[in-house]
Amino acid sequence: MTAAAARGHHRLASGLLAACIVAGSFTLWLGIPVAWLWLASRIADEYPTFFVVALLGCPLTMAAFGLLLARVNSAYMRVSGEARAARRTAWLRSLSGERRPRRPRALLDMSMTVSVLVALVLLSIWFLLYATNYGPPTP
């Protein structure tokens, strides 16, 4: 295999992993909660049970999916050649210490930030424009 072909394979692999990270970020904040609300509505007939099912299942699924995204991100960083330099936490750095140029943000950081913002905007739009209050049943 030539060097150009190897670079092409690395580009293709890093592009596919990047697409998985971006799609996975949106799935984490939009797809999983909607899927759990739909699933809970199919499982439970009463409102207290509905909320218990959704509030237990959704965070657990999101945590497991987040771990999967972290593994995909580490594979992306390996394939794309992004160096994983050890960073010191903010509380260990001196305020008067040397100022180094900031590293560019990782793809997972950026896609998670954008997907959270999109999810919050969509939730706000739904809440302000489309949500209806059914209220408790009247006896």
Image (cartoon, helix red, strand yellow):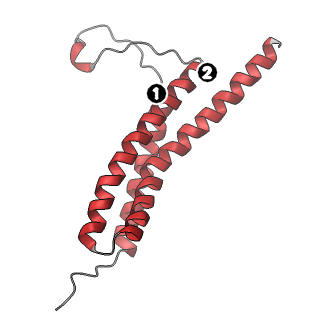
- Provide the residue designation for mark 1: 105
Specify the quadrant of the image occupied by residue 50. bottom left
Q: Is residue 87 above or below residue 23?
A: above
Kind of residue at disc 1: Arg
Q: Which residue lies furthest to the left in this view?
A: 139
Look at the image and tell me in which quarter the C terminus lies: bottom left
Q: Which of 102 and 42 is in front in this view?
A: 42
Q: How many labels does the image show?
A: 2
Q: In this view, does 78 lie to the left or right of 94?
A: right
**Horizontal and vertical percent for residue 61?**
39, 47
Q: State whether residue 24 is above or below residue 51.
A: above
Horizontal side, residue 34 vs residue 10: left or right: left
Kindly identify the residue that appears in the image at 65 percent across and 35 percent down: 16
Q: Distance between the residues labelled 1 and 2?
A: 17 Å
Residue farthest along the top direction in this orientation: 98
Callout 1–callout 2 Cβ contact below 8 Å: no
Q: In this view, does 104 lie above or below 124?
A: above
Type of residue at label 2?
Val
Using the image as rendered, state which of residue 47 and residue 83 is in the foreground: 47
The extreme bottom residue here reads 139
Mark 1 or mark 2, whichever is nearer to me: 2
Label 2 sits on residue: 79
Query: What residue is shown at x 76% (from left), y 23% (from top)?
Result: 8
Q: How crowded is mark 1: few (under 14 residues within 10 Å), some or many (20 or more)?
A: few
Q: Is mark 2 on a helix, strand or loop?
A: helix
| SS at badge 1 | loop
- Name which residue lies at 38% across and 55% down: 120
x, y percentage for residue 66? 42, 38
Dot 2 crowding, Cα within 10 Å, few <14, some 14–19, many 20+ = some
Residue 1 occupies quadrant: top right
Image-based side of 54 in relation to 32, left or right? left
Q: Is residue 102 above or below residue 26?
A: above
